[in-house]
Amino acid sequence: MQYFKICVGTLFGAGLIPFAPGTWGSFFTLPLIYGAAIASPLYGVPLLFVLTVVLSLWSTDASVEKFGNDPGQFVMDESAGQTATFLFISFSFTLSDFSILVTGFIIFRVFDILKPFGIKAVEKMRGKFGILADDLLAGLYALVCLKLLIHFVPGLV
């Protein structure tokens, strides 16, 4: 079971890519987000969000035991945060969705890497909730920014 938890925690190996594992984890979550939106436009992304949060909390301990505290290889938290970015985003199921996905990805990565507006403080929480919380907050900030871009600059996104 520990092996399977590590597989889930590394998003089936995405976190084992040596350069920028968090970015890869976020990137490989994008097709899951879009697939969930296609499968169920109303409930798909929220259900994926709940699933990624639960899987993150479930698999954290095994990854920490194998790789150390808040390991870079553990990217299920990035997957949850990236999914949060698209919680209330409507997709048109056209080519324009690609720009929405790319823009949301970039905004999330900026917040996740720079950790402004209290994200750094949340990251200091102990345990599995601290490992996850900073990514969720980064995802929520990215969601707000993405919604504002879509609303105020419709041709951009």
Image (cartoon, helix red, strand yellow):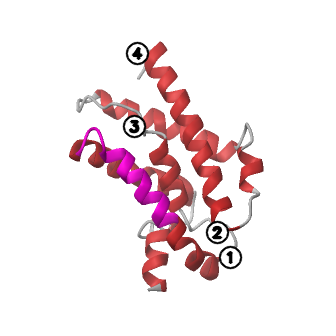
Residue 116, image x, y percentages: 72, 39
Q: Disc 4 to disc 1, how far (Cα)?
A: 43 Å
Tell which circle, 3 or 1, labels the residue nearer the N-terminal end: 1
Give the labeled residue for mark 3.
101
Q: Quadrant of residue 51?
A: bottom left
In the drawing, does residue 38 fall left or right of residue 100? Answer: left
Give the labeled residue for mark 4.
154
Compare residues 25 and 142 and report the one nearer the observer.
142
Q: Residue at x 44, y 21 (%)?
A: 150
What is the secondary structure assignment of the residue under circle 2?
loop
Magenta span has 43? Answer: yes
Give the labeled residue for mark 2.
71
Q: Residues within 10 Å of mark 4 (few under 14, many from 20)?
A: few
Q: Are marks 2 and 1 in contact (CB under 8 Å)?
A: yes
What is the secondary structure assignment of the residue under circle 4?
loop
Q: Are marks 3 and 2 in contact (CB under 8 Å)?
A: no
